[in-house]
Structure formats: C-alpha cells, structure tokens
Amino acid sequence: MTTETLERQQPLDMLCKQVSSIDDRIELVAIINRKGRVIEMTARDDGVNKDLTPHKREMLFMEFVLQASMNGEYDDEFGKVKGLILQREKISAFSFQIYDCLLIVITRPVPEPTVIQQRIAEIIFNYTKLELPVN
C-alpha cells in the first residue's frame, strides 16, 4: 500500500493524535516518507521540537529512515523489524514501519520504554487492520 492510498483511507493526523494522547511524556509524533520528509506531525509547543532547527529535525528524521533501510537488509534472515527504541539522556525515541512510511515518536525519557512501544504498536495495528487485504 502506498502512502497516497494510506492518506486517502484514513486521515494521518488522527493517527498522530491517537499516539500522542497515550502518554503525557510524548512530545512529538511524525509520519515521514522514505526520503525523511514529514507527511504529518503533531508536536507539543514546549517540547523537543522547539529545541530543533528545521535542518536538525530533517537530519534526525533522515537518520531514522537510514536506520530502517539498513535494518531491512536482514529481513530475510531475521524477519521484519517490528519497532525500534532509541534511548538518549534527554529523550526516548520510537520508530515503526507503516507500509512505506515511518511513524516516529519522541518522548521525554521513560523508565519502561517497552510499555509505550506496545501501546503505540496496538494503535498502529488498530489503525491498519481494516486496510490490510484479506487473503
């Protein structure tokens, strides 16, 4: 399914809003394409987004795209990546593949990142399950 099809079937801003509402520590939710360009984004005004220049945000998103591309090289051997967690001193970041896009979530540091990762994965599953072709 292409990004264009995904956008026509469900508003992507609704997905971003659903994800951003699951935890008060979530500061930014973005859906980016394979080139790292933002398709949809929800960010808190007082969050991490204010600390990033547009250029640095673009570079950060490109880093996620590059990582996803590199991880795809091992899909045959290990299976597809379900999601990634990156923990830094000041943030936790999550990345999920949705069709040909990436959903990026940046939070203040979280003690149990797998809990938030699972909640985000459930929202993504509920969002996409009606759009998957039935075999």
Image (tube, rainbow, N blue to C red):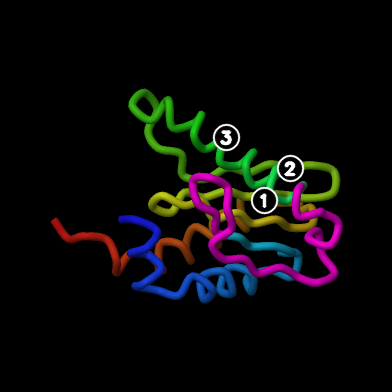
Q: Is residue 57 highlighted in magenta?
A: no
Residue located beneath label 3 in the image: 67
Could you give the CA–CA distance between mark 3 and mark 1, rounded to whole angstroms? 19 Å
Disc number for residue 87: 2
Mark 3 and mark 2 lie on one chain; the one further toward the N terminus is 3
Image disc number at residue 113? 1
Give the residue at x 76% y 70%.
44
Mark 2 surroundings: few (<14), some (14-19) or many (≥20) residues within 10 A:
some
Front: mark 1 or 2: 2
What amino acid type should be assigned to the residue bearing mark 2?
A: Gln
Number of the front mark, 3 or 1: 3
Where does the N terminus fall, quadrant-wise?
A: bottom left
Position of the C terminus by quadrant? bottom left
x and y percent of residue 36 in the render?
Answer: 57, 47
* Residue 95 horizontal/vertical position (percent): 57, 48
Q: CA distance from mark 1 to mark 2?
A: 9 Å
Is disc 1 placed on a helix, strand or loop? helix
Residue 73 position in % (x across, y down):
43, 26
Give the magenta part as a residue range: 31-55
Amino acid type, label 3: Gln
